[in-house]
Amino acid sequence: MSTIIVTNIKATGETASRPVSGVAGAWVNFNGQGTIAARDSMNVASLTDNGTGDYTVTFSNNMGNVNYIINTTGEQLASNDSNEINKDYGTAYTASAARIVVTQGSARTNPVYANFSAHGDMA
């Protein structure tokens, strides 16, 4: 495998380039009900089900520090049903994993699908 070192990246057909640091360092789309499993992912080593609506995403390659951001979504696949997924603010960020919680209203719930991405520098 070869490594290409760049500062900016531009896809074919795009007019603007963007910093490589803006590209997701890790992402996963996973089943949140029953036995959790990744549907597709990049740089995700494992998923842990910590209880209803409570998941840990462990990275294959660590983030460079704890100053990354996460983006999340979830869906139930019923009309007008959506979930709010947040970082578990009771748990500190680590370079190797992020813990997220899924709520619908004020109650934790297991979504049909959950989506997670982490943006920041890689180790």
Image (tube, rainbow, N blue to C red):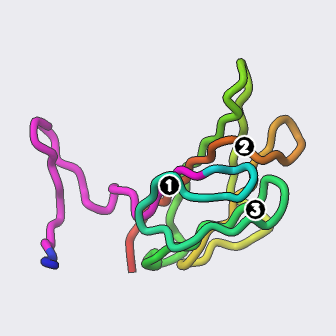
- What span is colored magenta in the figure? 4-30
Tell me, yes or no, whether the highlighted magenta stretch contains residue 23.
yes
Give the image location of residue 60, x and y in percent. Answer: 46, 76
Q: Amino acid at mark 2?
A: Pro
Q: State the residue position of label 2.
A: 111
Q: Residue at x 17, y 47 (%)?
A: 17
Report which residue position mark 1 lands on: 117
Label 3: which residue?
89
User: Image height check: is 60 above or below 89?
Assistant: below
At horizontal 51% and vertical 73% (from top left) the residue drawn is 45
Instruction: Choose the circle earlier in sequence order: 1 or 3.
Output: 3
Q: Is residue 5 in the magenta section?
A: yes
Question: Foreground mark, 1 or 3?
Answer: 1
Instruction: Determine the residue located farthest toward the front in the rendered image.
Output: 35
Q: Nearer the viewer, residue 48 or 122?
A: 48
- Which quarter of the figure is the N terminus placed in? bottom left
Seen in the image, is 113 located left or right of residue 103? left
- What is the CA distance from the residue labelled 2 to the residue labelled 1? 16 Å
Q: Amino acid at mark 1?
A: Ser
**Picture layout, residue 80 above or below residue 75:** above
Total labels drawn: 3
Indicate the position of residue 122 as horizontal and vertical percent values: 38, 74
The correct choice, above or below, for 86 with respect to 74 in the image is: below
Q: Residues within 10 Å of mark 1 (few under 14, many from 20)?
A: many
| Disc 1, SS | strand
In the image, is 45 to the left or to the right of 113?
A: left
In three-dimensional space, the C-alpha distance between marks 1 and 3, rounded to whole angstroms, equals: 17 Å
Q: Residues within 10 Å of mark 2 (few under 14, many from 20)?
A: many
Query: Which badge, 2 or 1, is on the more N-terminal residue?
Result: 2
Q: Nearer the viewer, mark 2 or mark 1?
A: 2
Crowding around mark 3 (Cα neighbors within 10 Å: few <14, some 14 to 19, many 20+) is: few
Question: Marks 2/3: CA distance?
Answer: 19 Å
